[in-house]
Image (tube, coloured by chain):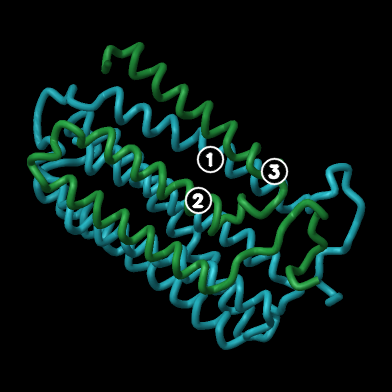
Chain colours: A green, B cyan
């Protein structure tokens, strides 16, 4: 019982230090690309979709690997993803309601 | 099994109740920060007087803060791995590193807020000031709570009371810390980079 409590049979073992380091390097590179895109004038037309895609990628990497959602029981993923989807829907609905789009 | 280990009690889901409860809490936190981000975005560009975002934002500083939180997420998972393997020295090093990185982030935010105040932006100056301070202030408060939590775990490890049998305590603290990190990922992009 390495993890201090009994895991559900459907849960997989968490990754090791090497995998964590590799994810950190990827996150760092994405952040550098984000900041670079912000400063490059020719990227202005695609600034918003590029930044949204890259930040969604970072978000997913942290949630899947550092928060272990990829390895833990699916119920944990649902408990996180459903409220997040509702929050995103609320943001978009309010922006439309207030004429942002 | 240690005296403080989570007993292998039966639950209707077969999952650990504390972890289930904490994920539910993080779900509610998504809604909380979602509402604050929505308020910022809805009122964006509607301030009648300055200072405006592009006049005060310091992107190099906030990029550095983003780097600090990302690295703290790495040290947090390394701390969890060390605790799970009963590596006391590793637990102490990585928990302290995570807490110090968090403190550095909070210090940067205090510097940023002070700078903004000197430039004439306070909570009541305009819609930008109100929504910005409330959103980032709540995030900074979450980081501060996380730092206190991490130092308390560090003290437990220092007293030899944080072995593998208590690793769920670190895993839950880690979930909170990573959540704070992902919220900053969203804030950094939506508020600072997309102006």
- Same-chain check, marks 3 and 2: no
Identify residue for label 1. Answer: B29
Q: Residue at x 46, y 67 (%)?
A: B74
Q: Is disc 1 surrounded by few (<14), some (14 to 19) or many (20+) residues within 10 Å?
A: some
Task: Give residue B138's position: percent from left, percent from top.
Answer: 40, 45
Query: Disc 2 vs disc 1: which is toward the camera?
Result: 2
| Mark 2 chain | B
Give the residue drawn at x 41%, y 25%: A91
B14 relative position to B85: left or right: right
* Quarter occupied by residue B6: bottom right
| Residue drawn 22% across the image and 42% down it | B193
Q: Which residue is mark 3?
A: A74
Q: Nearest the camera: B147 or B18?
A: B18
Badge 3 element: helix
Chain under disc 3? A
10 Å crowding of disc 3: few (<14), some (14-19), many (20+):
few
Circles 3 and 2, Cβ within 8 Å, touching? The answer is: no
């Amino acid at each position: 019982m390495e993890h201090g409590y009994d895991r559900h049979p459907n849960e997989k073992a968490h990754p090791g230090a090497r995998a964590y380091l590799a994810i950190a390097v990827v996150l760092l590179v994405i952040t550098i690309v984000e900041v670079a895109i912000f400063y490059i004038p020719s990227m202005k037309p695609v600034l918003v979709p590029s930044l949204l895609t890259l930040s969604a990628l970072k978000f997913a990497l942290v949630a899947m690997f550092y928060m272990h959602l990829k390895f833990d029981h699916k119920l944990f993923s649902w408990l996180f993803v459903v409220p997040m989807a509702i929050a995103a829907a609320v943001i978009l609905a309010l922006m439309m309601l207030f004429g942002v789009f | 099994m240690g005296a403080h280990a989570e007993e292998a009690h039966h639950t209707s889901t077969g999952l650990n109740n504390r972890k289930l409860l904490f994920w539910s809490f993080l779900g509610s936190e998504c809604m909380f920060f979602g509402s604050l981000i929505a308020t910022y975005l809805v009122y964006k560009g509607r301030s009648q007087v300055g200072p405006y975002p592009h006049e005060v934002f310091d992107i190099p500083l906030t990029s550095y803060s983003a780097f600090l939180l990302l690295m703290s997420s790495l040290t947090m998972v390394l701390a969890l791995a060390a605790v799970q393997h009963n590596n006391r020295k590793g637990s102490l090093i990585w928990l302290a590193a995570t807490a110090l990185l968090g403190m550095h982030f909070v210090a940067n935010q205090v510097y940023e807020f002070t700078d903004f105040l000197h430039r004439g932006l306070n909570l009541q100056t305009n819609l930008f000031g109100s929504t910005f301070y409330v959103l980032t202030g709540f995030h900074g408060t979450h980081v501060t709570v996380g730092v206190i939590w991490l130092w308390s775990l560090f003290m437990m490890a220092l007293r030899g009371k944080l072995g593998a049998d208590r690793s769920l305590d670190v895993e839950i603290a880690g979930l909170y810390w990573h959540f704070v990190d992902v919220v900053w990922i969203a804030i950094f992009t939506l508020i600072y980079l997309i102006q």
